[in-house]
Image (tube, rainbow, N blue to C red):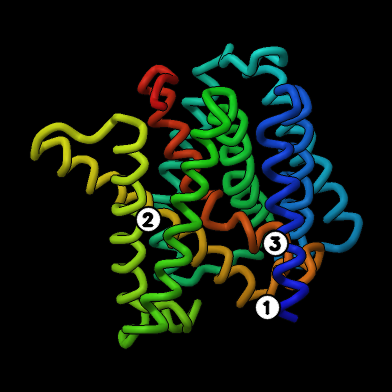
Amino acid sequence: MLRTRVVTALLLLAGFLFALFLPPFSVWLLIVSLVCGLGAWEWGRLLQLGTAGRHGYALLSLSLTGALGWVVFDLGSGRTQQPDVLLAAYMLAGAFWLLVVPLWLKAKWPVRSGLRGCLAGLVVLLPACLAMMQLRAISPLFLLAVMAAVWMADITAYVCGRAFGRRKLAPAISPGKTWEGAVGAVCGVWLYGSTIAALAGRTPDGAHAWMMFGVAMAVLTTVSIFGDLFESLAKRQAGVKDSGAILPGHGGVLDRIDSLTSTLPLVGLAALLWGGRMP
């Protein structure tokens, strides 16, 4: 099992880095649309849709992602042509992850509840996929750095949770997560972000700037945890361990991007408001 996980992880990393740095933007749009379609297929499984329903939901999500990408971005350069569309998508995603999901997790509302579950899946997937296009167009390294921050949160949460975890964060949803792991994730992301900022020559200047930087890292980490917990709730309600089995040893696509679906739209929003010149 460990060997399978390692081999799959290495192949995924190689394929991801190739797709991130080499193809033109138009190819990246197709890749992201395909990822959205696969994620939607798995979301349909969590909603317990039939085969025809899953096919339709996946095709709808893939088509919407491709169509929005075609409208919003210049296919040659990746430059944003319709920032208002991005802004609307990101504001919707921000409201969902910061306001709706905490209440959803607390109340444990059914995720697989018909139209509500289908709409939630679109809000989970589409803004994140648009952000993947936008951030890659700004700089492939920038997108990689943001994704690495989310991976750092996952790693440090796991390590600190295993070493120091005592208090359960959400025992009815994800029994393995602890408050100690969450604090460790915030610290790990802050340290990672500080290192990247220093390497990029963007170290915060002054106490106020450092405070705002710390708040941004804490919000980023918290929202990544929301993404993880929301998918965990959907899987628990569906009675499955993984969202799918397309990635041997790693489960499904959603299992790999759950934390990214919540964080990427917020980073995309910040980059949009910053004028697309964050790196």
Q: Which x, y percent locates residue 117?
A: 64, 57
Q: Quadrant of the C terminus?
A: top left
Residue 234 located left or right of residue 152: right
Residue ID for mark 1: 241
Callout 3 amino acid: Ala
Callout 2 amino acid: Thr
Residue ID for mark 2: 221
Alpha carbon separation for disc pair 2 and 3: 23 Å
Which circle's residue, 1 or 3, is located before the other in the chain? 3
Alpha carbon separation for disc pair 1 and 2: 23 Å
Q: Which x, y percent locates residue 96?
A: 46, 47
Q: Kindly indicate the quadrant of the structure image that contains residue 101.
A: bottom left
Q: Which x, y percent locates residue 2?
A: 70, 79
Q: Residue at x 36, y 73 (%)?
A: 181
How many other residues sit within 10 Å of disc 1, few (<14), some (14-19) or many (≥20)? few
At mark 3, the secondary structure is helix
The number of callouts visible is: 3
Q: Residue at x 53, y 37 (%)?
A: 143
Which circle's residue, 2 or 3, is located before the other in the chain? 3
